[in-house]
Amino acid sequence: EEVNNIDIINVFLEFLEVLTHQVVSLRDIYPSSVFIKTTKYGIPVKMSTHPWINKYIKKTLISIREFLQDSDNVLATYRVVVCIDDAAVERVVVETNLDTVSITDDEDDFLVDLELAFVSILGRMMDTMNMYVLDAMPTSWWIEIGTTQAGSLRLVKSLTWTSQQARVKVTSADDGGQDARVKGTSTSSGGQEARVKGTSTSSGGQEARVKGTS
């Protein structure tokens, strides 16, 4: 069966779901009893069993999937933001460019290579997060994505996402894009950032780069 763009999007969003659960688990935002140990991509991971947490993550990823089904929409970054008293202290950032993904060889080999890349990214992210100890226990978290200005407006119209007009700060990206945040509140520009396949940023705070291989 041929692997198409929708399949690639679904596989990628499944990876983002696993990554999000790992960030929330590693930062002890909820009691450890909320998470169960399981295996994904052949490595041990922790996944939430709490219906509210899972609903929030699922609803967000469904919204992103619907957004990406329009080829005019661009997902530049996916961020899990960890906060103390509503101020961002850590960002785990996945930089994406799904438009450049193409399957030129055997499809099974492509999916295997993709999973190996996910394993590499998750491992590097976990190692990076374990290197840094936050000053206090996180009190909240949310998901942000970076997209173009037009894409941000489309997301806001879906009523799932909020932007500057709806009490959340929208920051301009170097490529003229904007950020959209799910049910977020304003944050300072400081804080530690873990960036997956990242480049340096202009925001303040400490940055740890996590580079996955594809």
Image (cartoon, helix red, strand yellow):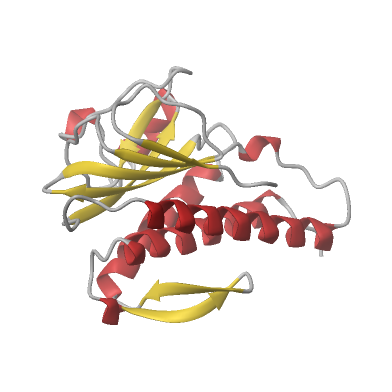
Residue 115 falls in image quadrant: bottom right
- Residue 71 lies, with reference to residue 109, above or below; the image says above
Total residue callouts: 0
Nearest the eye: 200 or 48: 200
Q: Would residue 136 appear left or right of 162 to someone viewing this image? A: left
Quadrant containing the N terminus is: bottom right
Residue 118 falls in image quadrant: bottom right
In the image, what residue occupies the spot 35% across and 64% down? Answer: 26
- Residue 70 lies, with reference to residue 164, above or below; the image says below
- Residue 22 lies, with reference to residue 68, above or below; the image says below
In the image, what residue occupies the spot 53% across and 43% down? Answer: 68
Q: Position of residue 156 (x, y in %)?
A: 31, 37
In the image, what residue occupies the spot 29% across and 75% down? Answer: 51
Nearest the eye: 59 or 169: 169
Residue 106 falls in image quadrant: bottom right
Q: Position of residue 37 (x, y in %)?
A: 44, 81
Q: Would residue 198 appear left or right of 25 to someone viewing this image? A: right
Q: Position of residue 101 (x, y in %)?
A: 71, 41
Nearest the eye: 71 or 138: 138
Outermost residue toward the right? 105
Q: Would residue 38 appear left or right of 34 to someone viewing this image? A: right
